[in-house]
Image: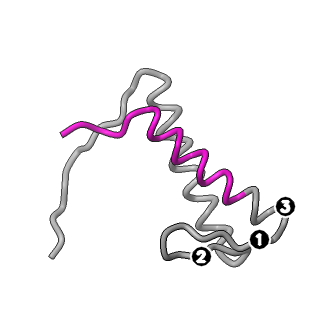
Amino acid sequence: MTGISQDDAQAMLDLWMGVLRDIASNGQAVTIGNRSYTAANLGEVQRQVAYWEGKVNRAAAGGGIRVRGIVPHG
């Protein structure tokens, strides 16, 4: 199984940065899939930005993105 590509990680970072920007600058609610994010979710959005930023930085540094294990659910 392959890990997340740098391009995919960058796309996710861009998506979450857009959500953060919309909430922070305009107070807009942003919907992704069936979830809506508002100022009340700002902490969660910031965690997503930090997570994907780390993935992008690790991939850019040549560390790659690895999958260490998979836990099956239900």
Question: Where does residue 73 sit, x and y in percent of width and height?
Answer: 18, 71
Question: Where does residue 47 sit, x and y in percent of width and height?
Answer: 57, 59
Mostly what secondary structure, the magenta segment?
helix
Residue 53 circle label: none
Tell me the SS state at disc 2. strand
N-term-proximal mark, 2 vs 3: 3
Residue on which disc 3 sits: 25
Q: Amino acid at mark 2?
A: Ser
- Asked whether, in this view, residue 21 is left or right of residue 58, the answer is right
Residue sitting at x 19%, y 55%: 70
Residue sitting at x 19%, y 50%: 69
Residue on which disc 1 sits: 28
Q: Between 27 and 47, which is closer to the camera in this rendering?
A: 27
N-term-proximal mark, 2 vs 1: 1
Question: Where does residue 15 sit, x and y in percent of width and height?
Answer: 59, 51
Q: Amino acid at mark 1?
A: Gln
Residue 36 circle label: 2
Residue sitting at x 59%, y 67%: 44
Residue sitting at x 24%, y 37%: 2
Is 13 rendered above or below residue 66?
A: below
- Asked whether, in this view, residue 8 is left or right of residue 46, the answer is left
Give yes or no for residue 10 being in the magenta stretch: yes
Tell me where residue 62 sits by quadrant: top left
Tell me where residue 26 sits by quadrant: bottom right
Residues at discs 2 and 1 in contact (Cβ within 8 Å): no
Numbered-mark total: 3
- Asked whether, in this view, residue 53 is left or right of residue 7, the answer is right
Tell me the SS state at disc 1. loop
Which quadrant of the figure contains the C terminus? bottom left
